[in-house]
Amino acid sequence: ILNVEQSPQSLHVQEGDSTNFTCSFPSSNFYALHWYRWETAKSPEALFVMTLNGDEKKKGRISATLNTKEGYSYLYIKGSQPEDSATYLCAFSGGYQKVTFGTGTKLQVIP
Amino acid sequence: SQTIHQWPATLVQPVGSPLSLECTVEGTSNPNLYWYRQAAGRGLQLLFYSIGIDQISSEVPQNLSASRPQDRQFILSSKKLLLSDSGFYLCAWGTSPYNYGYTFGSGTRLTVV
């Protein structure tokens, strides 16, 4: 069983604050690392799929970095807004049809 | 554009009753299709995936089954539900999702009572 851990489990931030959370995954047999945003009453939506060590991806105020050698990825949100409130999931892909999800970080942005 | 439909949105079923959840995809051919479940306090767990009609792979032993009678239709079933089957079920599709990520349906909240 592959261990994909996300921290923190949940956090509350004030509107305008920047924040970041972590996804830890096995450092062997790495294929890809996915980040999803899952808003309440909606489907999980893919944010980033990262495949190369040192990858950095950006989408608006959200960015992510990847370190496959040490097995972690960071997701950053700059200037959090209430609409950023969601659960952020990471998923480790160890090859063909082998994707393991973390339990997510639940973010609440307080206006 | 591709869309994925999943129904019903919520379901309350007694223990021992049957289950049928349906998922259809539009706007693509020969998609890889997936059923995931999220139980309380746990991450999304892959239950089944299918790379083609009548081709089903099971990842977790359980009393659930899946079928793919048509290219863009994926069905999750059970003959007799258990309390432990409660959870949030998500259908997903992708061409090569381990590389490019999944597109998820809207999910079904199943409560077995």
Image (tube, rainbow, N blue to C red):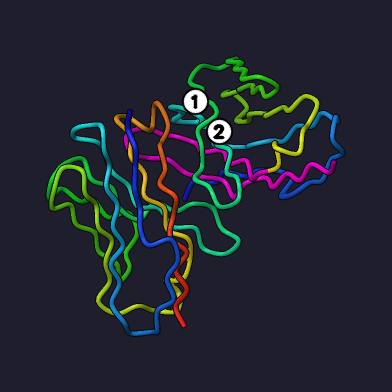
Badge 2 is on which residue? A35
How far across and down, in percent of the image, does residue A86 sit?
66, 44
**Relative to residue B58, is residue A92 depicted above or below?**
above
**Disc 2: CA contacts within 10 A as few (<14), some (14-19) or many (>=20):** many
Going 40% across and 79% down the picture, which residue do you hit? B13
Assess whether residue B44 is covered by the magenta stretch.
no
**Disc 1: CA contacts within 10 A as few (<14), some (14-19) or many (>=20):** many
Find the magenta span and give its range. Answer: A86-111
Q: Chain of mark 1?
A: A
- Residue A49 numbered tag: 1
Going 58% across and 38% down the picture, which residue do you hit? A37
Earlier-in-chain disc, 1 versus 2: 2
Going 24% across and 59% down the picture, which residue do you hit? B66
- State the residue in front, A25 or B113: B113
**Relative to residue A110, is residue B89 depicted above or below?**
below
Tell me the amino acid under the disc marked 1: Val
**Relative to residue B56, is residue A71 depicted above or below?**
above
Q: Are marks 1 and 2 in contact (CB under 8 Å)?
A: yes
How far across and down, in percent of the image, does residue B88 sit?
47, 60
Tell me the amino acid under the disc marked 2: Trp
